[in-house]
């Protein structure tokens, strides 16, 4: 339902529900800064100044889910609503209570700024007891310090949010996705040319290995024949067979200054 309301945005110590909380802000270096903060649940009125909320439980606790209730003329239903908490001295909305029923899951700063307010076992907020001398003295001391040190409460809240935003930017930067570089796929004709070139090179390398292998074997054979004074006799040694000639090589007989050609007299 969309209804017209009037909201009291200035804190009134006599009429408003006063809440004391702890605000925590994550800094961009990973540390957590925290401070006390005082908030109030604003009074909201409907038509003819009929109070809509905030509602308290029988024992004086501030209701979270059912803090504002409304009946619309001609409708038997009872509607519930929510008015964000406001900071006491500035009157600004500063509702970052993450365990509230109305906390926004889509808030981009939800992991970087948080306000904790004491709750009872039923999940209702425990207000500052205005009849408690010590509790009220602590509140007055907090107010005096802000006045004594000339703290601009509007700027103070802005600084808290800026610190949370800086931390989020740092977090997002550190955890940014790393994408692989784009790869150009070569044309099929280029792939085929490369494959043919590789095959041709492999063939040449195989021929070279065979050629140099033949030379090595011939050198071994030459050494054996020279050692046993067989240079002018055998075409091959028993059990070895003829050695293939490499490209451009001369027969053994030519390499050793004559003698029988391969296929001649055997030992």
Image (cartoon, rainbow, N blue to C red):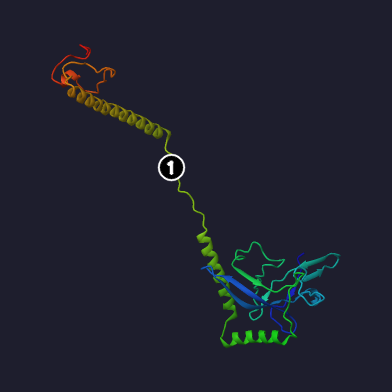
Residue closer to the observer: 73 or 40: 40
x%, y% of residue 22? 64, 75
Secondary structure at numbered mark 1: loop
- Crowding at mark 1 (Cα within 10 Å: few <14, some 14-19, many 20+): few
Residue 240's place in the image compared with 49, above or below, is above
x%, y% of residue 223? 20, 26
Quadrant of the drawing holding the N terminus: bottom right
Q: In which quarter of the image is residue 265?
A: top left
Residue 77's place in the image compared with 250, above or below, is below
Q: Residue at x 73, y 73 (%)?
A: 125
Q: Quadrant of residue 162?
A: bottom right
Q: How many marks?
A: 1
Quadrant of the drawing holding the C terminus: top left
| Left or right of residue 209, residue 31 in this image | right
Q: Mark 1 points at which residue?
A: 184
Q: Residue at x 58, y 88 (%)?
A: 148
x%, y% of residue 171? 53, 63
| Left or right of residue 6, residue 206 in this image | left
Q: In which quarter of the image is residue 112?
A: bottom right
Q: Residue at x 51, y 57 (%)?
A: 176
x%, y% of residue 53? 77, 74
Residue closer to the observer: 183 or 205: 205
| Left or right of residue 74, residue 249 in this image | left
State the residue lying farthest toward the left.
257
Residue closer to the observer: 226 or 188: 226
Q: Residue at x 80, y 69 (%)?
A: 70
């Amino acid at each position: 339902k969309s209804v017209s309301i009037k909201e009291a945005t200035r804190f009134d110590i006599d009429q408003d529900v006063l809440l004391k909380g702890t605000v925590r802000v994550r800094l961009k270096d990973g540390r957590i800064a925290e401070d006390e903060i005082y908030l109030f649940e604003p009074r909201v009125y409907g038509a003819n100044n009929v109070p809509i909320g905030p509602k308290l439980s029988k024992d004086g606790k501030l209701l979270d889910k059912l803090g504002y209730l409304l009946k619309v003329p001609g409708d038997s239903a009872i509607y519930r609503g929510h008015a964000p908490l406001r900071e006491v001295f500035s009157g600004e909305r500063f509702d970052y209570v993450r365990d509230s029923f109305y906390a926004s899951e889509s808030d981009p700063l939800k992991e970087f700024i948080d306000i904790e307010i004491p709750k009872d076992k039923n999940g209702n907020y425990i207000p500052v007891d205005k009849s408690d001398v010590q509790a009220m003295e602590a509140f007055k001391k907090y107010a005096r310090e802000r006045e004594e040190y000339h703290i601009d409460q509007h700027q103070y809240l802005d600084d808290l949010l800026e610190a949370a935003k800086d931390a989020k930017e740092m977090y997002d930067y550190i955890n940014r996705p790393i994408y692989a570089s784009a790869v150009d796929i070569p044309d099929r004709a280029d792939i085929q040319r490369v494959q043919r070139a590789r095959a041709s090179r492999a063939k040449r390398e195989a021929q070279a290995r065979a050629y140099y292998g033949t030379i090595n074997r011939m050198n071994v054979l030459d050494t054996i024949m020279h050692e046993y004074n067989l240079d002018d006799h055998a075409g091959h040694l028993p059990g070895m067979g003829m050695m293939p000639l490499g490209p451009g090589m001369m027969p053994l007989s030519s390499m050793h200054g004559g003698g029988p050609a391969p296929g001649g007299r055997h030992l």
